[in-house]
Image (cartoon, grey):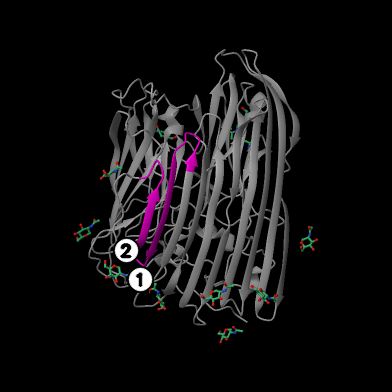
Amino acid sequence: MLPPPLLVAINELYTAANQMVLALPALLLAWVSFSAVLVDFQVAQPPPLPQDAKQCTVKILERTFGFSFGMAEVVQFTPPTDCGPVGSWAGISLNFTVTSNGTQFDRLGIFTFQNVEFWRTSTPEPTSGDGIIWTYLKDATKYTSLFAKPGTFILQLDNLLETGLDGQYATVLHATFFQSSARHPPATHADLIIPVSTLANDTGNDASVPPAFSLNVTVPRNAVQVFAELFASGNGDEEFWYFNAPNQFVDTIPTFGNGPFREVRMLVDGQVAGVAFPYAVIFTGGIVPTAWRPITSYGALEQPTYFIDLTPFVPILTDGNPHNISLDVVSAEDDHAINQNWFVSGNLQVVLDPSNKPTTGKITVLDAPPFAVTNTTGVVAGNDVNFTVTATRNIHIEADIVSGSGKRNHVVWSQNLQFSNTQDYINNSIVQLLEQTATGTFLSTHNGVSTLVDDFAYPLNINLTNLVPDGSFFVTLIDHSYNRKSQPASFNLGSTINEHQVAGGFFTIASTGNFGNGTSQNTFTYSDTHGNTYNRQVSAVDNNITSDHQGGTLAPKVGPHFPAFGPNALSVPKARLPGGRVRGN
Ligand SMILES: *[C@@H]1O[C@H](CO)[C@@H](O)[C@H](O)[C@H]1NC(C)=O
Ligand SMILES: *[C@@H]1O[C@H](CO)[C@@H](O)[C@H](O)[C@H]1NC(C)=O
Ligand SMILES: *[C@@H]1O[C@H](CO)[C@@H](O)[C@H](O)[C@H]1NC(C)=O
Ligand SMILES: *[C@@H]1O[C@H](CO)[C@@H](O)[C@H](O)[C@H]1NC(C)=O
Ligand SMILES: *[C@@H]1O[C@H](CO)[C@@H](O)[C@H](O)[C@H]1NC(C)=O
Ligand SMILES: *[C@@H]1O[C@H](CO)[C@@H](O)[C@H](O)[C@H]1NC(C)=O
Ligand SMILES: *[C@@H]1O[C@H](CO)[C@@H](O)[C@H](O)[C@H]1NC(C)=O
Ligand SMILES: *[C@@H]1O[C@H](CO)[C@@H](O)[C@H](O)[C@H]1NC(C)=O
Ligand SMILES: *[C@@H]1O[C@H](CO)[C@@H](O)[C@H](O)[C@H]1NC(C)=O
Ligand SMILES: *[C@@H]1O[C@H](CO)[C@@H](O)[C@H](O)[C@H]1NC(C)=O
Ligand SMILES: *[C@@H]1O[C@H](CO)[C@@H](O)[C@H](O)[C@H]1NC(C)=O
């Protein structure tokens, strides 16, 4: 029996792999006028930077992204000299403020500086009338060594304007440099940051995979520690990767194949050096768009990144030759294939030895198999298709490293990760249940001292229940969390975040215009290795904030930040559903 078609119109125009489109157009709709600017936001800690320090704020760029496809904003940036010696700052924060008006999809934003992608964001979908505004403040302190030099700054925000899609994104980006002092010492940071990126000079420096992205990278011979940061997000047929089905089950249910397990890998000369099980970022047009305004899904405005300790490979990387560093994303299918596409990039945060002499040493233990151990089981019976995909991953690498100045470092790098995804497509996919968890522990020790730590749990539960057989009216509940204790490198700030978001709503797809409603409940706590704390409990019903409490050392002194406003009739054009695509032609 054919599954019910859940989403009726898909415009193939948007599916090319390299296009930065997060959601496919479904149906156009009538506008609803809003009486006030809607203030969108992602729950997150304010940048943990010293507000009592002298601050120098500079505008990096200002650009309205209308029809901006393939036309990134490219500007030259020069660091300010009036907040102490360049590079000696106590910290750097960025303020990205955007307004938009009309009807538009959620779009990806890729910030690149000195060929290093350092921030991946996305746009909340606008409303007509007075439109929307959002500000995201990002702590950019770990990229201090980039910002201490002039260079090319790129913001890629590929937007399209056409009939029914008139929303433009008017953006402005400021950077604030916090002067260091005895009270607020200069921030510790990598000596050097090396891009693992496309190195393009006119567009975002992320690469589209598959196929795997590889780059020859030359590391200075006196490098003694290297930490790699990975960026990865699913796009197009991979936007809802967690809702994809193993190939053996996909034929009878309305979703994409290649299964729901995704592993992001970094390889050095073909050898796996470290991996990440990614957190699922749901963009603001995703599943039930009315659930994501004004509070976006966690990660939509600042996508999480993943650090791995590449220090065991330092003896190889410092031989003076270029080495082939690869990034890819693989599945639990037999051929490890995924759909099109993921955007990936990386950077190497490097510590140099003062001696300027080459580092030596060797890898003594190398247990890093090419792929995770996975298992796919399931049942097709009656009108149900139920399946589970699990994965476990263990990596253990040790190395002895001798710096040019004679210091010895015994490095132990281990990763232990677990993944499970169960999907039940019940009663001919009328009810679609998803239960996923990704958990893990990363630990590196340098001479026995904990250096890189990542303990994470990313549970994701979705219930999408169709209220009419053709899928044009459904209700969704999404319950997900981001629980993570992360110390990305000895020189970068460590933090513990516990974020829980329960969001959902009803949604109707109609030729006269899609509409729906939504609720969102968020509980967020943050603490870091500098002693800063922040917590927030905030809820919304439709466009209205119904309760909001903030606390901790980073909480704003005056409140409330986000006033409530109406109206409650939510008209949202840009929905795309996982498992909601009409299969076949
Ligand atoms: C961020 O930038 C916007 C636009 O320039 C400005 O209105 C706002 O006050 C800034 N916010 C902070 C916290 O600096
Ligand atoms: C949206 O358009 C309306 C009418 O043209 C205008 O009054 C409003 O300022 C605009 N809002 C934004 C956020 O651009
Ligand atoms: C950008 O890169 C292209 C090709 O890689 C090169 O020809 C061009 O000169 C570069 N432009 C600048 C401004 O660096
Ligand atoms: C990388 O460098 C090696 C050795 O220098 C060279 O053989 C190879 O072609 C290079 N690969 C790429 C992709 O540039
Ligand atoms: C780099 O390594 C990848 C595997 O990780 C391989 O597919 C690719 O061919 C290699 N590239 C070069 C130039 O050796
Ligand atoms: C996969 O999981 C099933 C169900 O738990 C189990 O019976 C089977 O032995 C597992 N297969 C492998 C290869 O681990
Ligand atoms: C599929 O899973 C649901 C629970 O989510 C269960 O009620 C149903 O019986 C299962 N169907 C089969 C065929 O196992
Ligand atoms: C899924 O949602 C529907 C509609 O709200 C509800 O009736 C059903 O009990 C939910 N199922 C589960 C397993 O939570
Ligand atoms: C299955 O879905 C149909 C609508 O297509 C509905 O009428 C029926 O009650 C559902 N059956 C069960 C057991 O929920
Ligand atoms: C959302 O819409 C559904 C269906 O029309 C309705 O039952 C529910 O009360 C609405 N919820 C909110 C919070 O407006
Ligand atoms: C949202 O707030 C407006 C007034 O600001 C009110 O008219 C409307 O009923 C509220 N909607 C909900 C769902 O609370």
Q: Does residue 54 sit above or below 296 in this rendering?
A: above
Camera-side residue of 532 and 114: 532
Q: Does residue 546 sit above or below 211 in this rendering?
A: below
Residue 203 in percent (x, y) is at: 41, 42
Q: Which residue is mark 1?
A: 28
Say what amino acid the circle numbered 1 marks. Leu
Say what amino acid the circle numbered 2 marks. Thr
In the rendered structure, find residue 399 and report the number of the disc placed on it. Answer: none
Q: Quadrant of the C terminus?
A: bottom right
Q: Secondary structure at mark 1?
A: loop
Q: Quadrant of residue 140?
A: top left
Mark 1 is surrounded, within 10 Å at the Cα level, by few (under 14), some (14 to 19) or many (20 or more) other residues, namely some
Residue 579 appears in the figure: no
In the rendered structure, find residue 103 and report the number of the disc placed on it. Answer: 2
Q: In which of the image's four quarters is ligand 9 placed?
A: bottom right
Q: Quadrant of the N terminus?
A: bottom right
Looking at the rendering, the stretch of residues picked out in magenta corresponds to: 527-555
Q: Are marks 2 and 1 in contact (CB under 8 Å)?
A: yes
Q: Secondary structure at mark 2?
A: loop
Residue 184 in percent (x, y) is at: 39, 26
Dominant secondary-structure state across the stretch colored magenta: strand
Magenta residue check for 123 = no
